[in-house]
Image (tube, rainbow, N blue to C red):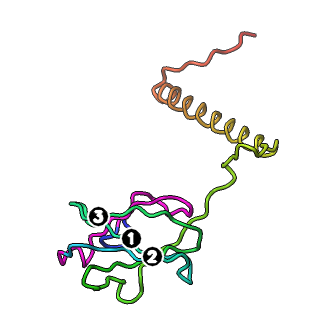
Amino acid sequence: MELSKNIFFNTDKLVENSKVKISYLGKLYQDNSDEVSIHYGFGINWDNVNDIKMEKTDLGFQAEIQLLEGDTFNFCFKNGNEEWDNNNGQNYVFPLEKVQNELVVLEDEPVSLGSARKLRRSYLWSKKVRLAVYKIITYLPKLISGNYKRKLKEN
């Protein structure tokens, strides 16, 4: 997923408490910098600030980062000469999505009957929809072509 020009992630969504691989092909890579670090933090206050040296590859500079809790993932890049790519002073700031807890079941946590019923109901609806699609695909061409004859009850 490309979040900004020359910045790519290996995932479609940035979700807190997950790992993400970032690839950077921006200004510092194009200027042939030998080494680049990513400087990052979380939330409006840049909590848990960290620097990680990125690995230079044919696909740009890359690093794997553990996303922590926060509303946003904030970062910028610097090379060995202390030159920065900070999005023209704006930094790169992207929203983090919360973990979807309703489908996560912990080992020691009992599953409530309400959530089990919801899952069963959605499963049944998906089966009904699949059956309806199958019937439409199977019988609609016969109806259109006239090859389908309905059996009439004899009186």
- The picture quadrant where one finds residue 110 is top right
Q: Which residue is painted at 31% across and 69% down in the image? A: 24
Which element is circle 1 on?
strand
How crowded pointer 3 is (Cα within 10 Å; few <14, some 14-19, many 20+) is rated as: some
Q: Which residue is painted at 55% across and 67% down in the image? A: 68
**Residue 89 horizontal side relative to residue 118, left or right:** left
- Kindly check if marks 2 and 1 are in contact, taking CB atoms under 8 A apart as contact: yes
Distance from Cα at disc 2 to Cα at disc 1 = 9 Å
Residue 52: mark:
1
**Residue 80 horizontal side relative to residue 38, left or right:** left
Three-letter residue code for mark 3: Glu
| Region in magenta | 8-32
**Residue 46 horizontal side relative to residue 26, left or right:** right
Report x, y in % for residue 39: 41, 77
Write down the residue under mark 3.
55
Report x, y in % for residue 30: 20, 75
